[in-house]
Image: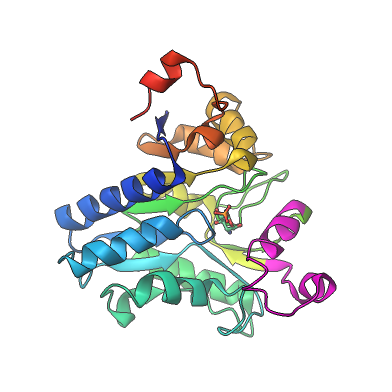
């Protein structure tokens, strides 16, 4: 069953997520973490940097990025490798030898996915997988479809994902590129951990903020389990929490008193 934790603001989602990660690392200094990218976890990473400055030690921790675009150099603005360096690895002390990522520029992405699964298995699987959710219900880059793959795999991105992810940076961050330039430059294929590694994680923690996620969250919580909404598969996990702000939880601006009371 999925536990929905309602929080009052996106900032609280980030702070609570960081707290949970910190508790995991304190309890288990050798923890294996799966790490998300995107806008949603930025606050969590910022807080983890702050907690590290106050003594939280990541030196024994092993990390795995959840997914990466194919064919994107590290200096590309869309690179998830770059994102994790910028938001996390430069702020904490995860040993470089224990940071795992897909090599975006590898010659053979299928072989790269097999290598990645071997590394996950050698690490003993994830203790805590921190996840985001696409507004189409994707988890990492496991997109909706007829089937899902347990193993890490290459994935052609859904049109909705391309549309949303290509526009996720601010105009300032996009520099002088025109809209057209961005669209043609945007990668359309990715490598992702499969649902097997996600579902095998000891604990799952999903972060969701903003109204664009509310439909997927509602379906994930209340709908049937279907490959058409990969996040719905999390229903079969026995330790899965979702931290959501009111917009993602589907509570309108004037949430009922009962809903207000249910905020954490
Ligand atoms: C990308 C990532 C997902 C992430 C999603 C949400 O598609 N592959 O792992 O969950 O973005 O991103 P955001 O937090 O920016 O909404």
Q: Residue at x 40, y 35 (%)?
A: 7
What's the magenta region? 160-189
Identify the image's colour scheme: rainbow, by chain, secondary structure or one colour.
rainbow
Q: Residue at x 64, y 61 (%)?
A: 168
Q: Looking at this view, is 55 or 190 the one in front?
A: 55
Q: Quadrant of the N terminus?
A: top left
Residue 171 seen in render: yes
Q: Looking at this view, is 72 or 75 the one in front?
A: 75
Q: Residue at x 31, y 53 (%)?
A: 18
How many numbered marks appear? Answer: 0
Q: Looking at this view, is 144 or 178 the one in front?
A: 178
Residue 148 within the magenta-colored segment of the rendering = no
Q: Quadrant of residue 137?
A: top right
Please say if 11 is above or below 81.
Answer: above
Q: Position of residue 258 (x, y in %)?
A: 42, 14
Q: Is residue 213 left or right of residue 96?
A: right
Residue 177 within the magenta-colored segment of the rendering = yes
Residue 225 seen in render: no
């Amino acid at each position: 069953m999925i536990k929905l934790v309602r929080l009052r603001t996106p900032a609280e989602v980030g702070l609570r997520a960081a707290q949970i990660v910190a508790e995991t690392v304190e309890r288990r200094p050798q923890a294996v973490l799966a790490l998300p990218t995107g806008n949603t976890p930025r606050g969590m990473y910022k807080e983890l940097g702050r907690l590290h400055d106050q003594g939280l030690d990541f030196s024994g921790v092993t990390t795995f990025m959840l997914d990466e675009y194919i064919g994107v150099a590290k200096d590309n603005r869309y690179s998830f490798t770059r994102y994790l360096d910028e938001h996390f690895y430069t702020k904490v002390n995860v040993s470089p030898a224990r940071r795992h990522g897909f090599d975006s520029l590898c010659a053979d992405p299928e072989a790269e996915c097999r290598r990645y699964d071997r590394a996950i298995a050698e690490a003993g699987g994830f203790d805590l997988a921190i996840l985001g959710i696409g507004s189409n219900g994707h988890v990492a880059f496991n997109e909706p479809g007829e089937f899902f793959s347990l193993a890490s795999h290459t994935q052609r991105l859904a049109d909705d994902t391309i549309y949303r992810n290509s526009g996720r940076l601010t105009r300032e961050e996009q520099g002088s590129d025109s809209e057209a330039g961005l669209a043609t430059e945007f990668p359309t294929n990715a490598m992702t951990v499969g649902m097997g590694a996600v579902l095998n994680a000891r604990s799952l923690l999903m972060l969701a903020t903003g109204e664009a996620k509310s439909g997927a969250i509602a379906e994930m919580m209340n709908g049937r389990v279907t490959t058409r909404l990969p996040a719905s598969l999390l229903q079969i996990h026995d330790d899965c929490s979702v931290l959501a702000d009111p917009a993602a939880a589907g509570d309108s601006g004037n949430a009922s008193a009962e809903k207000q009371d249910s905020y954490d």
